[in-house]
Amino acid sequence: MFGIDSTVLMFVVLAGMSAGAVAYAFLFNRISEEKNVGKRLQTIKAADSDRASVKASRDRVAEAAKRRKSVQESLKELDEKQKLQDRNVSKAPLKLQIRQAGLDLSLGRFYLYSAICGLALTLVAFVAGLPPVILPGVLVAGGLGLPRWIVSFLRARRVKAFLNEFPNALDIIVRAVKSGLPLNDGVRLIASEAPEPVRGEFRRIVDAQQMGLSIPDAAMRMPETMPCSEAGFFGIVIQIQAQAGGNLSEALGNLSRVLRDRKKMKAKVAALSMEAKASAVIIGSLPIIVAFLVYLTSPEYITPLFTTSGGNMILGVSALWMSIGIFVMRKMMNFDV
């Protein structure tokens, strides 16, 4: 019985194996075709994924190149505008210089004050007993030289006060932008809270914006009333950010850091050149001090310099050479940072 069952069982197993072999023989081509189809589908999917990644990479490269080209064009345009503004600042007309000095004067009133100043100095020189030959020079110096020097002095002092407070104003704008406020609110905050002359300059930006100008265009006009490169930097940063985009708070923060570094460098240069300035002051004042001491001790020895034509000529030539020496020393001590 066991032998029969074993024979039947082996027969059944062999029959099943034979049927499986026959089925596999018939289905082999279909199975291999399905495998090939699966492989082709995977290849097509991989190719589509690669094409998509390549396309995305190309789009990123094209976008970066487009943005770089836009930034380069913006920089070129801003550089041309800045050169034009620098020309206007370095050779600004008298009316613009008066405005940059923070004075509310018309040209006619300025010329009137200049004439009064020249006549007053000439009268003082005449009362002091100076030779009549020198009086026309005093009139020219008092009418043309002194008023313009005062305007230049007030202009430089205003620029210095602006540079001392400008980085703090930029920091306030950076904090305002980081806290979620728009740039307009930051500019208005400076225009109402900052000390002069920063407040006045940002007030002009707000007024220009209310008249229809955008903030970048109004900021680019700041160097017209504030003749310094730092004001131009601010306008360029705002203009580039408006045209090319980017992190405004980071750009203004970097500008504030650069301005502070420039200020430190200027202070370092001033400290290093202080010895040369002291030497120049001593050398320049030594002839005047010696002449005054000689006049106190021996007036009859030095009086001919003031009473004779030869002495006046010697004084004029000496003053000319001393002025040239002082001018050369000043040029040697002044550094542009």
Image (cartoon, rainbow, N blue to C red):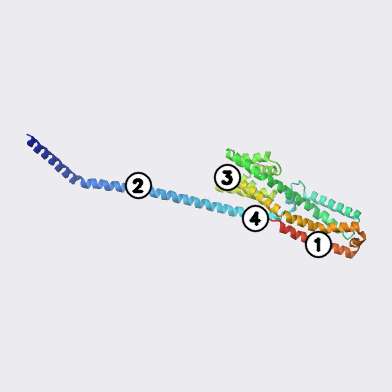
From the viewer's perspective, is 321 left or right of 87?
A: right
In the image: residue 225, left or right of residue 124: left
Could you tell which of marks 3 and 1 lies nearer the N-terminus?
3
Element at badge 1?
A: helix
Residue sitting at x 47%, y 49%: 60
Q: Tag 1: Cα neighbours inside 10 Å, few (<14), some, or many (≥20)?
A: few
Report how far apart the C-alphas of labels 3 and 1 lie in the structure.
53 Å
Which numbered disc covers residue 45? 2
| Residue type beneath disc 2 | Lys
Query: CA–CA distance between discs 4 and 2?
Result: 56 Å
| Cα–Cα span, label 3 and label 2 | 42 Å
On the question of residue 2 being in view, the answer is yes
The answer to whether residue 135 of the structure is visible from this angle is: no
C-alpha distance separating marks 3 and 4: 26 Å
> Which label lies toward us, 1 or 2?
1
Three-letter code, disc 4: Lys
Report the front residue among 106 and 165.
165
